[in-house]
Each structure stands twice: as C-alpha cells, then as structure tokens.
Image (tube, rainbow, N blue to C red):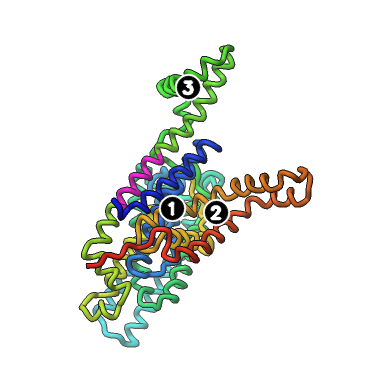
Amino acid sequence: MRNYENVITAYIIMLLLIICVGLFQSWSIALTILNYCLISAVMTIGANMQWGYAGLINFGIMGYTALGGLAVVLVSVEPVKKAWQAGGLNILLSMWVIIIMVISIRFILKKFNKTKTRSLGILSILIFGIYLIRSTATPGIEAIEAVDPARYGFLGGLGLPVLLSWIVGAFFAAGLALIVGKIALGLRADYLAIATLLIAEIVVSIIKHEEWLARGVKNVIGLKRPAPYEIDLQRSEWFIKIVEKINLGKLNLIQSISDRQDALKQMVIDASSIYVKLCFTGLFLSVVIILLIITQKALYSPWGRKMRAIRDNEEAASAMGKNIVKEHLLIFVLGSAIVGLAGAMMVTNDGLFTPGSYRPMRYTFVIWVMVIVGGTGNNFGAILGGFVVWFLWVEAAPIALFLINIFTAHLPATHGLKVHLIESAPYFRFLLIGIGLLMIMRYRPQGIIPEKIIKQ
C-alpha cells in the first residue's frame, strides 16, 4: 500500500476537484468533465503503451481516433436504402477491384524475382485498377451524395448495437496501424513522428471529403447510444417518482400546487441529464478499469520487461535474440487499437460524428502533454495526466474569471483593464496549461507519478 500512497493521494485530489465542480457549478458539468477525463484516460493508456513501454513516437493519434469515430457511424447508423439502391453496387464493385489488386500484387511479389518485368506488371495492375475504380466508383458516389443531401447523402451503416462499434473501432485503428507499422517502423524516431502525423492528416482528410462514407463535414447527428434518452426518462413514471422521493423535503416547502409541479418538472429535467451522464460514467469507468488491469499485468509480465529492455537499449536486446521490429509492430498495433476504442467512446458520448473537429496538428500534442504530465511509462500516471490536463482545459476559463473578479474587485465594472481581462478569460486555458507543463518539467520532469523502477 505504501508504494501506491502517491497514486491514491493524487486520485483523491482529482476526485475532490470533480466534487467541487459539482458543488459550485453543477453536477451535470462535473459529470461531463469526468466522462471526458475517462475518455482521455483511455487515449493516454494507448499512447503510453507506445511511448512509455516501447519508446515509439506516434503523432498520428487523431487519425486512429477518427477511425474509431467512423466505426460508430458505419456500425450503428441504419442503412440508407435509397443510397444503396442508387450507388451501393458501384461501391461494392470498386471494393472488389481493390481486393483483387492487392491479391494480384502480393502474388507477383511472392512468385517472381525482382526484375523490370515484375515492376512493369505491378505498374500495369495499378494503372488498370485505378482506371476501373474511377469508372465504377465515381458514378456511384455522385448518385449516393445526391440522395436527400440535407439529411442523408451517404450509405449509412449496419444498424447494429453501438457498443459493438467500440470493438470495431479498435479493429479499424489496429488495421491501419498494422499497415503504417509495416511501412514506417523502420524509420528513425523523428522521421517516424513526421510520418505518423502526415498519415493522420491523410486519414482525417479522406473522412472529411468522402461524403458518401460518413457525410464528410456535413456531420452525422442523432447517433445511437447505450444509455436512455433524457426525454424518455422525463416521461417515465418510475423516474418521476424517484426524483420526487429524493427531493420530497424541498417540494414540501412549496405551498402552491402549480409551483410545486413546475419545480418537480425542472428537477426531473435536471435529474434526467445527470442520470444519463452517470450511465456513461459507469460504462467508461468499466473500460478504464479493465484496460488498467490488463496493461498493469502486461507491464510487469515477462513481455513487459522485454519491451522496456528494448526501449532502453535496442542494440543489447537485439544481441539477445529479440526481434525488435516484430515487437515494435505489436505494441504499435495494440496502442493504436486502444486509441481507436477511445475515439468510438468519444463519438458515442457526443452523439454525433464531426470529422472537421479532428485536427492532428492541435489535439495530438494535447494527448502527448497528458502522458508527459502524468508520467511516462506509468499507467496510473498516464490516466492521471488525462484527468489533470482535461480538467484544466475545461475549467481554466471559470478559474481565470474567478481570479480576475477577485483581483479587480476594486476597479469599476466599466474599467478598460477589467473588461479586457474578463473578455480574455477563455484564452487563459493556454496560459494555465503552459505554466502547468513548465512547472512539471522543472520540478517533476518524470511526471506527477513517474515510472516505477523494479530492481530484480
């Protein structure tokens, strides 16, 4: 227990901060922050596996997050029958062309030696395949996007339960990571970082511009979710009775029957929002706990010790007969799959898919800051870093506004400095996160909860 005193203390502080938000702002805001902290924790677990376990720099986190979100659309949204009738066959034909191209190229690479003839054969397959794809897919895409573009304009999904999309999102991200890893993991660390960042930009750009796939920048709204809807709860007798019973003391103080009914109605509305967020909290917390247990066991297993040995000294590990490329590829795929899972969780929580919000050049580095602040190589630290940075990101403006009002209380409300500071409060988040990161790097360079070194 003594070994985990700093972990317990840090987590208690974060829990108290969430409770303070509930007491001084609202419990709905507190639960919203908590849910996004839990989603951020899943992302940081994935990033920490790659960087903390193996020393791999992956700046393509937003690409895998977007794929996780795309999985929610492709799995849970009901299929658009008119769109399938208009151009679905063309899309399926073009997909078969791509599969045949891949199989043909792999066959040629395996069966024939490296010659000019082989290269010309591969080039011919690529040119002819691209021509077939364009000739089959283009008319289909135009027909699909023309089907009621204000509401649809895309093929839709499979209409399956949304929780299944979380698993599919992890597989989507893992599949992309496998392809990227095969190509890029042989690069030097700095080139690997650049390559993964550019691949993330490509993935996000494709999702944004291929409207037939998920409406592009038009967004997909009204997604399914594994929790009841507020409006349904507000109409349920059992829920209304529970809220009335909980708030009976407050309601008894109201004399007027109409005022009492209005107050109960507002209480039911507020309680329904809190109840739904609590359902999401339970789901997200379950995922974080399961991932934490698995990653902790993996970290202190022989495999985890092997990964840390490769991270600390690749030459020595290679001399001991370890396949560095194979192990790097495995952990790159596993970490990306967890990030894809987090992307699916985030879209499910939001209830909409907005490809325009995935900005690799911005949010990728926020995730990296979370890992660095929490403690590289420590799962508890990575989760804490997600909580700390996201909490600051959301609460920086209210905290700044509170401090501004205190320090400018002696100034009149129309004073230029006071007005300017109040209007600038939303931008203080960058200042606070920057100061926090500098303080961590200066006084706690290994993170709030640094990696635990086990001496054998």
Question: In which quadrant of the rendered view does residue 330 lie?
Answer: bottom left
Whichever of callouts 1 and 3 sits on the residue coming sooner in the sequence is 1
Q: CA distance from mark 1 to mark 3?
A: 34 Å
Q: Which mark is residue 40?
A: 1
Residue at the outermost bottom position: 116
Amino acid identity at mark 3: Asn
10 Å crowding of disc 1: few (<14), some (14-19), many (20+): many
* Upstream in sequence: badge 3 or badge 2: 2
Tag 2: residue type?
Val
Question: Which secondary structure, mark 3?
Answer: loop
Which residue range is magenta in the image?
280-292
Disc nearest the viewer among 2 and 1:
1
* Residue at the image point whose x is 65% and y is 50% from the top: 425
Please state if 365 lies on the left or on the right of 345 as rendered.
Answer: right
Residue 55: percent from the left, percent from the top? 36, 70
Q: Which residue is mark 2?
A: 217
| Label 2 vs 1, first from the N-terminus | 1
Q: Are marks 2 and 1 in contact (CB under 8 Å)?
A: no
Location of residue 146 in the rendering, given as x and y in whole percent from the top left corner? 53, 50
- For mark 3, what is the residue? 247
Is residue 350 visible to us here?
A: no
Dominant secondary structure of the residues highlighted in magenta in the image: helix
From the viewer's side, name the closer residue of 360 and 365.
Answer: 365
